[in-house]
């Protein structure tokens, strides 16, 4: 298993593993991140073994999906915008949990550990593909070279969690090739259908569901995430796009992003994100 790195300077620690000049900071601080994260979860659920691990070991996910969604977003934010020390601590916590967990997935008969490198790679690639695809369709200005740079930067995230660096796709083309190779092994299991229902229509307290706009707002985001899945994934879920064409989904996503950009900056993303920007804006000591 890949060892966690160490031995960086104070300045390297302050800038984190990616830094303010990275494409990763641009993509992960954009309001489109939330939709990309939901798309990633929907895509990840199509791997029977990876989804079995979520269903078995993400305690209470069926009844209360919110804590897992928050933990996942917090992890990605810390890895991207935290100091290197903060990022490594977050990674170590996750790896410590992973190495204790394993089971046998019924539909494939595969015995697995949650930290099997191929499962970690699947989760990583779904996240990278989703966050990049959604950002570009939302209108984040990224050239093809910058898109490749983003995928290459994220190899560091894969390595930190336990994937061998040479195994992680380092370009958009390599990422697309990975998904083509994986498609024959994907399936919509009962656990995947449960995850789909939880993401599209999560449980909410009755007063929240009927007395606030939360259900409608979440439903709109979830429908958008479904519509932004690859066509082959939408077909697997038997939802070609919830009535949205690709053009309509892109237009709706751009409108969502523009609406979010008009909000105060601190309302768009988590405090971890803006804490990172504030930290690197501080002049280093002379």
Image: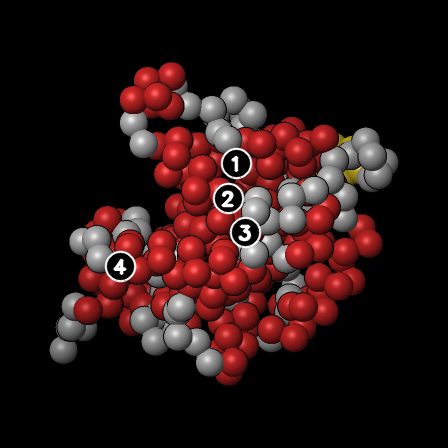
Q: Are marks 3 and 2 in contact (CB under 8 Å)?
A: yes
Nearer mark to the viewer, of 2 and 4: 2
Rounded to the nearest angstrom, the CA distance separating label 4 from label 3 is: 23 Å
Nearer mark to the viewer, of 4 and 3: 3
Residue that appears at 56% across and 60% down: 246
Q: Earlier in the sequence, mark 4 or mark 1?
A: 1
Nearer mark to the viewer, of 1 and 3: 3
Q: Quadrant of the N terminus?
A: bottom right
Name the residue beneath numbered marker 4: 261
Residue that appears at 46% across and 80% down: 143
Q: Residues within 10 Å of mark 2 (few under 14, many from 20)?
A: many
Q: Are marks 4 and 3 in contact (CB under 8 Å)?
A: no
Q: Quadrant of the C terminus?
A: bottom left
Q: Residues within 10 Å of mark 1 (few under 14, many from 20)?
A: many
User: Who is closer to the viewer here, 118 or 232?
Assistant: 232
Q: Are marks 2 and 1 in contact (CB under 8 Å)?
A: yes
Q: Earlier in the sequence, mark 3 or mark 2?
A: 2
Q: Residues within 10 Å of mark 3 (few under 14, many from 20)?
A: some
Helix, strand, or loop for circle 4? helix
Rounded to the nearest angstrom, the CA distance separating label 3 from label 2 is: 9 Å
Helix, strand, or loop for circle 3? loop
Residue that appears at 24% across and 68% down: 280
User: Who is closer to the viewer here, 65 or 152?
Assistant: 65
Q: Earlier in the sequence, mark 2 or mark 4?
A: 2
Q: Earlier in the sequence, mark 1 or mark 3?
A: 1
Name the residue beneath numbered marker 2: 223
Q: Are marks 1 and 3 in contact (CB under 8 Å)?
A: no
Name the residue beneath numbered marker 1: 200
């Amino acid at each position: 298993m890949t060892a966690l790195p160490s031995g960086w300077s104070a300045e390297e620690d302050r800038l984190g593993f990616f830094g303010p000049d990275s494409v990763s900071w641009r993509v992960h601080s954009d309001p489109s991140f939330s939709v990309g994260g939901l798309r990633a979860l929907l895509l990840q659920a199509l791997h029977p073994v990876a989804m079995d691990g979520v269903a078995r070991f993400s305690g209470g996910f069926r009844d209360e999906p919110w804590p897992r969604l928050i933990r996942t977003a917090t992890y990605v934010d810390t890895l991207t915008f935290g100091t290197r020390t903060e990022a490594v601590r977050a990674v170590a916590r996750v790896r410590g949990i992973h190495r204790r967990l394993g089971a046998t997935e019924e539909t494939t008969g595969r015995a697995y550990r949650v930290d099997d490198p191929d499962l970690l790679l699947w989760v990583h690639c779904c996240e990278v593909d989703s966050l990049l695809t959604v950002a570009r369709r939302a209108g984040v200005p990224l050239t093809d070279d910058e898109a490749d740079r983003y995928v290459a930067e994220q190899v560091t995230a894969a390595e930190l969690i336990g994937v061998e660096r040479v195994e992680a796709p380092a370009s958009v083309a390599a990422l697309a090739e990975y998904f083509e190779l994986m498609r024959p092994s994907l399936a919509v299991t009962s656990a995947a259908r449960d995850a789909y229902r939880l993401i599209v229509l999560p449980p909410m307290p009755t007063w929240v569901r009927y007395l606030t706009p939360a259900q409608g707002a979440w439903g709109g985001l979830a429908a958008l995430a479904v519509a932004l899945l690859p066509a082959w994934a939408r077909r697997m879920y038997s939802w070609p796009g919830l009535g949205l064409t690709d053009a309509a989904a892109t237009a709706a996503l751009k409108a969502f992003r523009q609406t979010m950009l008009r909000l105060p900056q601190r309302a768009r993303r988590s405090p971890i994100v803006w804490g990172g920007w504030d930290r690197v804006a501080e002049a280093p000591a002379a």
